Structure formats: structure tokens, C-alpha cells
């Protein structure tokens, strides 16, 4: 008898397989993040391996994580994130199922609560089963799991000619280890540990026979991390939750707080601060707001600058962390593959296998035309807000290099333009960076190099910012030079971008000088 035939005889597998193709309702997904790990799952708490998963350092280390009761999925009662974005909770109840001895259990007899968090590269989950019926029940609780170890860009749709080696799962009494050796020479591991030994454990499923007496509860703890943990337990879960909440609270308390007589306004501010705190990662250079979950949970230059500009009035420490990180990763060489030139500020950085192997340029990529002038503008705004000229003095060589790149980039046409240096890079390099985001009124894709109008505004602000900083440093000749460059840019934009017949500015000017 084949394995497939055996699975057909297993009613639990058959039922769950049928339900696997059902629509995901509600369609909303929930995200958790801590450090360089994040998880995306549906309202049931399930990961099904489409675009969701548990990711660590741009690699999906858990591509399936589904819970079934009595061989069936559950009915959703509600799901939410805690206000501090640390805990995900899903409340569920059973569909009509049979107990382990074949007795019918009606829908709604068993309440299931899933609570999940991430702390120090590890996913913690607590599964609580409460029996609200008057009957003792022994039920089959199954966790279905898999790890495809796909790079973030594979999950997003990129194809690869060759992948590394996926290892056969290693099962122990209370854990299973999933492993993959990347082509970059790095092993990637995902260990799933349980608070009690499963009654049946395979390389993709753990079955527990759990006796829930009437009006009682049973709790199962699960952890997923890069190595097998100590036995998951109530104490470990509570300790991780406490540390995660303390860490998030500390991030939310950075900077000033705002309170008003308006309850709705106060709630909005608290929600916004919690969301910024969720995205902010503590790096060696200081706090950095990552660009977004799931696909952009990494340091982006433009996004970090604009986020910290918007937070500058409340938390200038965020801007300091962004400036320090970007200065440390400033380009020092010319590379068509990474679109780098000396003085240019980074657009994006990645840690995954494909980036390490240079299958794509985003390991450290500089194809953002606006990040460099925005970096200078942020430094000037930070100095105005804080008066921290000691920090600006440390940044001064980096700021001068960025200003020199900006001047050089505008030398040919008078404007800072972009045109990708290699086919692997981004075709459009402003904030509208999809391949067809910049086009003529008749739909034509313009020829490069392209000068975006807003970028020239950033350059104007950067030159004025450099002039102000130079003046504060007593470098008056340089200050006058940059003031003149700012005025030249202002005049050129009014001359070349303004469209009298349409009474507004052109989106861009293409390589043929056409707006």
C-alpha cells in the first residue's frame, strides 16, 4: 500500500485536505514582528504557505503551521492583536467532530484559544482547549507544519535555477528539526518543540490525544526557533511575553508623549506609536524603522528617512539612528550591479540567500535617486530640532560626500536624474518605483535618464540644509556655494517643469528633454 493510499484511509487527513482548498475567511492577515523575524498568519492563526509564513533574516523558516481538532479546521469566533502589537490571539470553536473513541461532539463544545508572540528569533504559541460540554472528551489535536526555507524573493514570485539541499526531518520525542543548507554555505534550521510528547509525530504533523474533562482546560505550548528549546512551558511563555512587552513599551516611550482632551485622538496617537514601535528594530547604530511587513521588513533608505522626519517632533532619536546607519552603509565605490557610486546613500538591504549569492542586487542596493538628498535634509532637520552639532560633526565627511554625489549627478542636465546601470536593477528609482509608474500622457514609457520633479525639491532642500549646517560650523564659503546651488535648482525647476498650458508641474522630464 502506498503512502498516498494510507493517507486516504485516514479520515482526519482526508477532512483537512478537503478543507485546505476552502476560501480563507476573513481574508485579513495578522502580522507580528520582533528584530529581524516576523510572522504573517490568517485570523485562525494558520500559516498555509502562499504569501504567509514565519520569516527569519529574509528566509521563510515556517511555510505551514495549521491546527486541526478532530481532523477538521475550526470555526472562527474572533482574532486580534494586542494594543502593543506583541500578542496575536485567535478564539475558535470546534465544528461537529468525533472524539478519539468515536463519540459525536457537537459544534461549539470545545473553545480553542491560540496566543502567539515572537521573542529573540523564536515563535511562542499557547493553545488552550476548554471543554464547555458536560461530557468528558478525548480529542485529537493536530499541528500540521512545514518549512520550505524559501528566500523572501522566491516567496514573492522570483524563480531560481538551483536551490540548496533540504534535509530529511529529524524527529525526537518532543521535537522535530527541519533543515536546509543554502547555496551560500549557511545552514538554516527550524526546530519545532512541544510541551508534551505527541502521540504520533511525523516529519510534517504532530498528533496529540488530549483528554479534556467537563468544564476544564488543557494547555499545549509550542515553540519554533533555530534550535530545539528547553521544554516549552507556561513559565517560558510568560517570561518571553513579559520581556517582549517590556521591550515594546520601552520603544514606545522613546521621545515625547502627547495627550489631549480628545479620547479618539489619544487612541489614534497610541495606535500610531505602537505601529512605529513594531516596525522599529534596534540595530548596532541605533533604532531604525523598517519599511513594512511582510515584504519590506528591512532597512530602506527612503522609508527610514521619511518615517524619522515625520517622528522628528516627538522622537529625534529615531532620526539619529537612521542617519548613523545610512552613513555607515554609504557607497564608496562604483558598481553597476548595485547601482552604487561614491557618496550615494543606500536604498535597500537584504540578508537572504539570493542576496548573498548576488542572484539579485538587493543585498546592499543603491538604486534610489532620492535617498541621498533626503539623507542630507534629515541631517539638517535633526540639527534644527536638537542642536546636536557634535553628532553632525561626526557625520560631516559623509554629508559632504553625499552633497558631492548630488552635485555630480546634476552636472550633465542641471537636474538629478536616474537610469539603472544594470538590467537587474529597478527601472524607476523614485518612490514610484514599479516598472510602469512613470509614463507620458499617451502611455509611452519614457527614455532615460529621467528627472522627477519631487527629487529636485529634495535636492533644493539638501543644498539649503548643507548651507545651514556649514554656516553653523563656520564654513561660510561652502555655505554660500550651497545656497547658490539651491537657488540655481529653484530657478531651473520653475523654468523647465512648469507647464503654462496645463497650469501645473510636470511629473518628470525624460532623457529627450520632454515633460
Image (cartoon, helix red, strand yellow):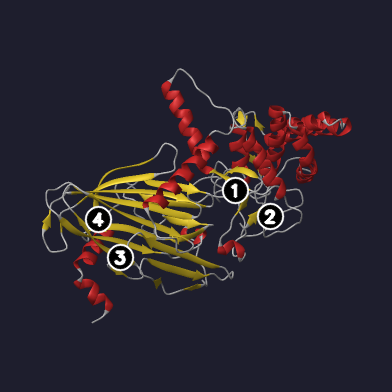
Residue under label 1, please give it: 299
**501 on left or right of 404:** left
Q: Secondary structure at mark 4?
A: loop
> For the residue carrying disc 3, how many other residues have a C-alpha within 10 Å: few (<14), some (14-19), or many (20+)?
many
Residue under label 2, please give it: 339
Query: x and y percent of residue 455 in the render?
Result: 67, 39
Residue under label 3, please give it: 198
Query: x and y percent of residue 428 in the render?
Result: 60, 49
Q: CA distance from mark 1 to mark 4?
A: 37 Å
**335 on left or right of 19:** right
Mark 3 and mark 1 in contact? Answer it, CB < 8 Å.
no
Q: CA distance from mark 4 to mark 2?
A: 48 Å
Q: Secondary structure at mark 2?
A: loop
Q: Is residue 318 above or below residue 333?
A: above
> For the residue carrying disc 1, how many other residues have a C-alpha within 10 Å: few (<14), some (14-19), or many (20+)?
many
Q: CA distance from mark 3 to mark 2?
A: 52 Å
> For the residue carrying disc 4, how many other residues have a C-alpha within 10 Å: few (<14), some (14-19), or many (20+)?
many
Residue under label 4, please give it: 73
- The quadrant of the image that shows the N terminus is bottom left
Q: CA distance from mark 3 to mark 1?
A: 40 Å
Query: x and y percent of residue 213 in the render?
Result: 17, 53
Amino acid at each position: 500500500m502506498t503512502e498516498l493510499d494510507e493517507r486516504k484511509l485516514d479520515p482526519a487527513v482526508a477532512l483537512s485536505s478537503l478543507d485546505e482548498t476552502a476560501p480563507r475567511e476573513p481574508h485579513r492577515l495578522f502580522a507580528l514582528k520582533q528584530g529581524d523575524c516576523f510572522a504573517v498568519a490568517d485570523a485562525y492563526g494558520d500559516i498555509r504557505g502562499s504569501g504567509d509564513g514565519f520569516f527569519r533574516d529574509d528566509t521563510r523558516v515556517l511555510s505551514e503551521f495549521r491546527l486541526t481538532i478532530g481532523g477538521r479546521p475550526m470555526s472562527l469566533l474572533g482574532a486580534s492583536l494586542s494594543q502593543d502589537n506583541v500578542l496575536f490571539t485567535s478564539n475558535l470553536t470546534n465544528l461537529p467532530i468525533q472524539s478519539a473513541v468515536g463519540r459525536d461532539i457537537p459544534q461549539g463544545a470545545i473553545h480553542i484559544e491560540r496566543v502567539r508572540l515572537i521573542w529573540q528569533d523564536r515563535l511562542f504559541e499557547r493553545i488552550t482547549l476548554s471543554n464547555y460540554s458536560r461530557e468528558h472528551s478525548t480529542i485529537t489535536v493536530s499541528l500540521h507544519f512545514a518549512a520550505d526555507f524559501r528566500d523572501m524573493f522566491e516567496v514573492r514570485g522570483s524563480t531560481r535555477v538551483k536551490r540548496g539541499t533540504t534535509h530529511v526531518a529529524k524527529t525526537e520525542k518532543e521535537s522535530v528539526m527541519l533543515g536546509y543548507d543554502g547555496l551560500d554555505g549557511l545552514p538554516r534550521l527550524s526546530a519545532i518543540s512541544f510541551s508534551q510528547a505527541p502521540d504520533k509525530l511525523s516529519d510534517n504533523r504532530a498528533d496529540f490525544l488530549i483528554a479534556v474533562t467537563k468544564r476544564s482546560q488543557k494547555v499545549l505550548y509550542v515553540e519554533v526557533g533555530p534550535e530545539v528549546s528547553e521544554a516549552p512551558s507556561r513559565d517560558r511563555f510568560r517570561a518571553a511575553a513579559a520581556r517582549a512587552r517590556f521591550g515594546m513599551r520601552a520603544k514606545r516611550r522613546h521621545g515625547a508623549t502627547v495627550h489631549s482632551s480628545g479620547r479618539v485622538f489619544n487612541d489614534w496617537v497610541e495606535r500610531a506609536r505602537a505601529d512605529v514601535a513594531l516596525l522599529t528594530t534596534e540595530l548596532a547604530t541605533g533604532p531604525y524603522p523598517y519599511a513594512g511587513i511582510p515584504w519590506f521588513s528591512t532597512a530602506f533608505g527612503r522609508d527610514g528617512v521619511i518615517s524619522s522626519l515625520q517622528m522628528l517632533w516627538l522622537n529625534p532619536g529615531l532620526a539619529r539612528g537612521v542617519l548613523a546607519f545610512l552613513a555607515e552603509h554609504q557607497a564608496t565605490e562604483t558598481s553597476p550591479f548595485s547601482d552604487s557610486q561614491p557618496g550615494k546613500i543606500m536604498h535597500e538591504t537584504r540578508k537572504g540567500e539570493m542576496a548573498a549569492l548576488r542572484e539579485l542586487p538587493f543585498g546592499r542596493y543603491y538604486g534610489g535617486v532620492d535617498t541621498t538628498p533626503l539623507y542630507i535634509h534629515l541631517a539638517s532637520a535633526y540639527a534644527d530640532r536638537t542642536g546636536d552639532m557634535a553628532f553632525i560633526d561626526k557625520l560631516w565627511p559623509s554629508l559632504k560626500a553625499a552633497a558631492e554625489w548630488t552635485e555630480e549627478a546634476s552636472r550633465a542636465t542641471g537636474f538629478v536624474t536616474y537610469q539603472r546601470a544594470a538590467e537587474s536593477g529597478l527601472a524607476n528609482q523614485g518612490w514610484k518605483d514599479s516598472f510602469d509608474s512613470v509614463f507620458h500622457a499617451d502611455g509611452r514609457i519614457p527614455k532615460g535618464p529621467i528627472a522627477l520633479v519631487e527629487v529636485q525639491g529634495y535636492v533644493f532642500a539638501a543644498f539649503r540644509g548643507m548651507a545651514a549646517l556649514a554656516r553653523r560650523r563656520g564654513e561660510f564659503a561652502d555655505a554660500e556655494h550651497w545656497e547658490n546651488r539651491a537657488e540655481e535648482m529653484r530657478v531651473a525647476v520653475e523654468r523647465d517643469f512648469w507647464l503654462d498650458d496645463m497650469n501645473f508641474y510636470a511629473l518628470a522630464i525624460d532623457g529627450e528633454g520632454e515633460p
